[in-house]
Every structure is written in C-alpha cells, then in structure tokens.
Image (cartoon, coloured by chain):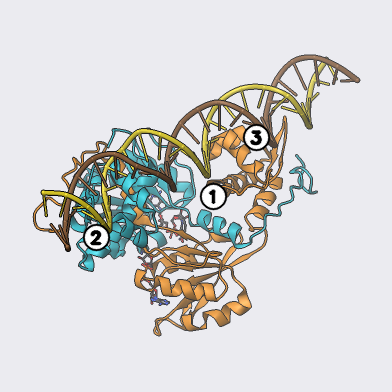
Chain colours: A cyan, B orange, C brown, D yellow
Amino acid sequence: MTETRVPIPTLERLAIYLRVLLDAHEAGIQTLSSQEMEQHSGISAAQFRKDLSYFGEFGKPGVGYSVSGLIHCIERILRLDEEQPILLVGAGNIGSALVGYPNFRAHRLRIAAVFDNNFVKIGRPFGDLMIEDIARIKEVNAEIGARLGIIAVPAHAAQEVADLLVEAGVTGILNFAPTILRVPEHVHVRNVSFLQELAVLSYHAVEEALCVNGQATRGGKDGV
Amino acid sequence: MTETRVPIPTLERLAIYLRVLLDAHEAGIQTLSSQEMEQHSGISAAQFRKDLSYFGEFGKPGVGYSVSGLIHCIERILRLDEEQPILLVGAGNIGSALVGYPNFRAHRLRIAAVFDNNFVKIGRPFGDLMIEDIARIKEVNAEIGARLGIIAVPAHAAQEVADLLVEAGVTGILNFAPTILRVPEHVHVRNVSFLQELAVLSYHAVEEALCVNGQATRGGKDGV
DNA sequence: GCGAGATTGTGAACGAGTTCACAAGTTGCG
DNA sequence: CGCAACTTGTGAACTCGTTCACAATCTCGC
Ligand SMILES: NC(=O)c1ccc[n+]([C@@H]2O[C@H](COP(=O)([O-])OP(=O)(O)OC[C@H]3O[C@@H](n4cnc5c(N)ncnc54)[C@H](O)[C@@H]3O)[C@@H](O)[C@H]2O)c1
Ligand SMILES: NC(=O)c1ccc[n+]([C@@H]2O[C@H](COP(=O)([O-])OP(=O)(O)OC[C@H]3O[C@@H](n4cnc5c(N)ncnc54)[C@H](O)[C@@H]3O)[C@@H](O)[C@H]2O)c1
C-alpha cells in the first residue's frame, strides 16, 4: 500500500481480475479466495494478492474477497465506476467492429462519437451514432469531455489524428495503426498490433531457431 | 548469441524493427545504424543490438546494418520468409476486418481459410474466401497445413474452437475472445483484448489514485 | 598503410517485476 | 473459550530483462 508507482502489468491484470469477478458475480458466487482466482484467471495467487496490495487491503484472512466488493474497488481503481466516453476516429473495418461491440457496456466504456474525413461517410449512421467530420472533433469533444480516443485510420494519417485527439483534450490513445506516435509527455498511448502478435506466434510455431547468421552484407543483390 | 531462450519482448520488438526496415527499404535507404533505428522505432539503440545478439551478428562495426540483409534475417527468424497460412474461425465483425486487411501480405501471413458454425453463413463468400463449416476444419487443414489460428468467436465458444484448432494441428493461437484458453503445453496462445488496453488507459487518464480502500466486506448490500 | 572516426556485440551492473514464505488475522467447531 | 484450518498482506529473495560502457571491428581519406 506504499505510494510507489503501479507496474503496468499490474494494471493489465486488474482488467483480467475484473472479468473473472464479473463472471463469478453472474454465477452467484459471493466470495473468492486468491487461490480460486488463480484457477479462473491463470494468474498466480501470490501475484493477485501483490497486485491488489498496491491499492489497499480488500480481503479477509481466512475467507477471501467479497466478489461484489472487489468489483467495485477495481472499477474505482480503473476509473470504470462511472461511464468513460471515448472518441473513435476512422469509420472503417476496425471502427465497424468496435462500434457494435456489446462488451464495452459491462466496463462502462462507451464510444461517444465517431469521426472520419471521408465526405462520403460523414453524416451517415454508424452503429447508434452518426459519423462526424474529423474537423469538428475539438468542438464535439468540448461537449463530451472524453479523455480516451481510438485511432483506426491508415498508418499515414495516424500521427495527424493523434495530434487532433490531443488537441481535443484526450490523454489516452488506443492506436490500431502500425506507427510510432509522437505525443506530449502527459498522453499515454497503447498500440494494438495483430501483425506483431502473429509474428511472435509464427516464431514459436516452428520450434528450432536456425537463422544461422549469414553476415548481413553477404547475400548478393544488395550492396551496402 | 548463446543458446539462451529468447525473451518474448525481444520477439515483439523484432516485428517492430521489421516494419521500420520495410519502410526504410521502401524509401530506398540501404544502411541503418542502431542509432537511426532508435529514432524510427522508439526503441533504444542498445536494446536493438542486444535483441539481435540473441540470433547472431548482423551488422558491420562502423557502418550499421544492411537494410535488405536484415529484413531477410528477421523474416527468417520470425518464420516469415515463406508464406504462413492461417486459419480464421468466426466470420463476424472481427473476422471481417481481418480478411480484408492488406498489410498481412507484406509479412507473408495469409488467411487461408475461414470457418463458422452458422449455417446461414457457411458457403457464403468472405473476402476472397468462402466460409467453411467448422466441422470440416481438421479435414481442410490436412491440406493447408496451417500452424497458426485466429479465434474470433464469442467467448462461450472459444475453448471449444481452441480444442478444434489444436486437433487440426495448429500450434499458435491468436485469441480475440475474452477468455483464458486451456491448451496443451506445446501450443502458444496470445490474447488480444481491447477492453484490457482501454482499462489501462482509463486508469492513466485520471492521474490520482484515490481508491481509499473501503474494506471489501463493508458496503451494505453484499454479504460474504 | 595507417590513424581518425564511427558503430557493433556483449559482459557486467542495474532495476523492475515476480515468487516465496511467513507473521498476522479470521472463522468455526468442539 | 481456545485450537485448528485457512487465507491475507507483504518484506525479502530471486529472476528476468534492460541499460551501460567499452574492447573489437570496420571504413575512409590522406
Ligand atoms: N483491418 C484490420 O484487420 C486491421 C488489423 C490490424 C491493424 N489495422 C490497422 O487499423 C487501421 C484501420 O484499419 P481499417 O481496416 O479499419 O482501415 P479502413 O481503410 O477500413 O478504414 C480507415 C478509415 O479511416 C478514414 N480516414 C483516413 N484518413 C483519415 C483522417 N485523416 N481522419 C479521419 N479519418 C480518416 C478513412 O476514411 C476510413 O474510413 C489501419 O491503420 C490498419 O493498418 C487494421
Ligand atoms: N467486435 C469487437 O470490437 C470486439 C472487440 C474485442 C473483442 N471481441 C471479441 O472477439 C470475438 C468476436 O467478436 P465479433 O464482434 O466478431 O463477434 P460476432 O458475433 O460478430 O462474430 C462471431 C462469429 O462466430 C461464429 N461462431 C459462434 N460460435 C461458433 C463456433 N462454435 N464455431 C465457429 N464459429 C462460431 C458466429 O456465427 C459469428 O459469425 C468475441 O469473443 C468478442 O468478445 C470483439
């Protein structure tokens, strides 16, 4: 419970714990021990307790954790105790999948507006929303007050969009585009890259490591 | 260059390096120093060199790395030097986004077949492919020989699908469903969870940590 | 050919995050 | 009540990955 900075892996796991707890709640379970959490989450009991210890004491020795109590606490920690509006930029394939995704609700995350720069798309309905002109993003967010934004535009437009989001007041960006974003100190970015994930899997899919070197510069057609 | 196990973060970064290198290649750049890689990737020069050192020596002191040479080496390391077929299960929102995604090509990843269990969808075209019956997955993969699979079905069906994929010979699974999958030792799973990513961002979006405890069991309506 | 300048590859130091292990707290039963 | 069974919270040890720093290597120009 010291005032140390919380490790990011801990925050990632909190979201997993929350999911397990919501499932347990659904199933009518009232109490959960760290041992049981390990069963359901695949994360070790010690890790679970240590993670929570960054934020306070939530369990009862000899008993475990109140499911609903802990749900509330984790929601409070992750700022999911009240609705978080989100700005989505890019009404394409990824954007489509996101607007219709029902599970956001359970976490009190809500896509509050969608933006695009394609005049053909602007004004059209998109899920429950209407696609807005990216040029109006600052104006629109003055009302919404979202702190989170999602970038689902092609890579070449991502930096530009990031700048607009930041200007509109966003401090957390989920980026689907395969680019490194440059943002101010106070803005957090998390990248989602399916290609990267698949590349890691691809490596493991074939067991042996046999890139037997081969000295970069050798190999024929490409001079240095 | 010792035979130690390669850290997973290193593999993740390799995919990033590859992207930067491909961009550089596109731009006609022939040589890149670790310093320049740091500029473009946001990953420190020392980290870059250390990462590569797990696999061999690819650079020339005083010069840097041959862009095309290193591309080939990283591709070889990540098994992206020849086409990797992938099985996609779930012809829904996420599935749609994936089949049409052009960037897979550049990494020689190819979705080779799509499966679903919805009789209305089976037989319909989906991107360049036709949706196949999930029941035929083993049979189909006997021909394709894919080692990678993507799960894009609802959470309640994910485990079942994972079992089928494993049975069909897949050893690496990219899982979009919010569930912990139980798989045999030799199968690798990577989970993609937008909710988790957003939860982490949500935490950071509001700076202070003020979950002032509140002792789990207290709080009224929920007994232990 | 040789010295100046650049850059790599890597052992060693460091640090962040995980696991261990146990004291302290809680419950229930005899 | 008091003891046995159980579970938490957390300092300490440990593990794994990152950063540092420098010897070794290579290029180029004179
Ligand atoms: N589709 C996938 O499976 C997938 C997978 C991984 C990553 N991605 C990445 O996600 C991003 C989006 O992918 P997608 O498939 O949805 O692309 P898409 O082409 O379907 O949609 C992109 C949308 O962004 C809009 N747009 C372009 N420039 C814009 C700008 N400056 N401001 C506002 N809107 C703009 C376009 O009009 C379009 O509607 C891309 O960067 C892509 O690389 C996609
Ligand atoms: N849509 C999103 O933005 C989003 C975001 C994050 C995670 N996810 C997760 O990704 C998964 C897929 O999401 P989606 O939006 O594409 O869902 P979806 O409902 O659009 O598509 C799911 C598809 O899976 C098929 N399916 C169901 N059971 C099956 C089975 N046993 N075998 C084969 N196919 C089966 C369905 O027929 C359907 O076509 C879900 O687990 C969801 O939680 C989605």
Q: Is residue D30 above or below residue A66?
A: above
Q: Secondary structure at mark 3?
A: loop
Chain letter for mark 3 = B
Tags 3 and 2 in contact by the CB under 8 Å rule? Answer: no
Between circles 3 and 2, the one closer to the viewer is 2
Residue A34 placement (x, y as % from top left): 31, 54
Residue B7 placement (x, y as % from top left): 56, 47
Q: Where does the N terminus of chain B fall, quadrant-wise?
A: top right
Distance between mark 1 and mark 3 Cα atoms: 23 Å
Which quadrant would residue A63 be assigned to in this image? bottom left
Residue that carries the numbered disc 2 in the rendered image:
A106
The circle drawn on residue B8 is 1
Q: Is residue B40 above or below residue A82?
A: above
In this picture, residue B60 sits left or right of residue D14: right
> Along the line of sight, which residue is nearer the eye, A137 or A197?
A197
Name the residue rendered at 55%, 35% in the picture. B44
Distance between mark 3 and mark 2 Cα atoms: 47 Å
Q: Where does the C terminus of chain B fall, quadrant-wise?
A: bottom left
Circle 1 crowding by C-alpha within 10 Å: few under 14, some 14–19, many from 20: few
Number of callouts in the render? 3
Residue at the left extreme, as displayed: B220
Which mark is first along the chain, 3 or 1? 1
Chain letter for mark 1 = B
Under 8 Å from ligand 2: the CB of mark 2? no
Name the residue rendered at 71%, 54% in the picture. A210
Which quadrant would residue A96 be assigned to in this image? bottom left
Circle 2 crowding by C-alpha within 10 Å: few under 14, some 14–19, many from 20: few
Residue that carries the numbered disc 3 in the rendered image:
B33
Amino acid identity at mark 1: Ile
Q: Secondary structure at mark 2?
A: helix
Q: Secondary structure at mark 1?
A: helix
Ligand 1 occupies quarter:
bottom left
